[in-house]
Amino acid sequence: MRVIGHRGNSSVAPQNTLAAFEAACAAGVDAIELDVQLTADGHAVVIHDDEVDATTDGSGRVDTLTLDQVRTLDAGSWFAPAYAGQRVPVLDEVVDLLVRHPRTDLLLELKGVWTADRVRLLLGPLAEAGLLPRVVGQSFEPDSVAALREVAPQLHRGLLVEDLPLGPDGAPHLAALDALCSRLGVMTCNPDGRLLQTHPDLVEAQHAAGRQVMAWTLDEPWMWAEAQALGVDAVITNRPDRLRGWLAARAGER
């Protein structure tokens, strides 16, 4: 079972900062997960919320701020004084990090709806660095996943799922999820971990269709044990260091 650091190692460092990504790499993650949005002047920055208020000392929507404005913000003090001065990363910094950590892959979440032109801005630096084979692009928005396919058909893609889509009878169905994943041509279906409790056959159904399953955001040992028993391919967690230790202990018991 692969370990993916949700917004880096976000239990020990401020989420979606270089400090959190470095901590995740130090913990031996298989991949880091991060969120990208575009500034008002068209630069890709790493931040989860539409607004900067929750994780920086600034305010306002990301898409109304220029890159220079975003880069002046302190993205670390809210977490702990030791992280004062951490900045909202730009994509070039993520590229540099991946080059320095060749064993670490990237799970790249597009927040909101992205057009093909916006996706080209995003993927360009990753392609130039030869990193696309180590990237899985994902989104909750089917249109964004379709834009990824249009721009880079060779890119591995994933669909984030919070609830099952509705079938013809208006009820949620695994078959409707399979149909959506098939239409988008994704290689992984990435559900909210709570769906594994209500629909434990989701993993088997996706595997039968030739897709992987990466579940989010599982932070407790009982959740990891449940995911492992179901055959989940990867766990996205805020505690990747602890999950790595838990997996090592389980392997030692066998």
Image (cartoon, rainbow, N blue to C red):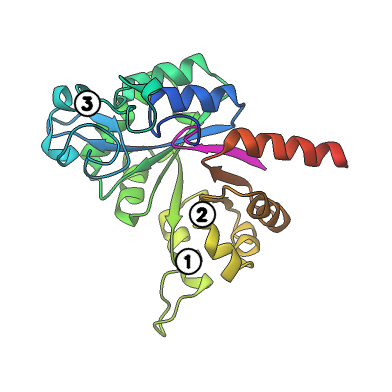
Compare marks 1 and 3 and give the one earlier in the sequence.
Answer: 3
Q: Residue at x 57, y 22 (%)?
A: 26
Instruction: State yes or no: residue 235 in magenta.
Output: no
How far apart are the two marked residues, 3 and 2, measured between alpha carbons?
34 Å
How far apart are the two marked residues, 1 and 3, measured between alpha carbons?
39 Å
Viewer-nearest of discs 1 and 3: 3
- Give the farthest residue toward the bottom: 169
- Crowdedness near tag 2: few (<14), some (14–19) or many (≥20) residues, C-alpha within 10 Å: many
Q: Is residue 233 visible?
A: yes
User: Which residue carries the number 1 mark?
Assistant: 177
Contact flag, marks 3 and 2 (Cβ < 8 Å): no
The quadrant in which the N terminus is found is: top right
Give x and y (percent) for residue 76: 34, 27
Residue span colored magenta: 1-10
- Crowdedness near tag 1: few (<14), some (14–19) or many (≥20) residues, C-alpha within 10 Å: many
Q: Is residue 127 visible?
A: no
Q: Which amino acid, mark 3?
A: Leu
Give x and y (percent) for residue 56: 26, 33
Depth check: give the residue in front, 68 or 135: 68
User: Which residue carries the number 3 mark?
Assistant: 73
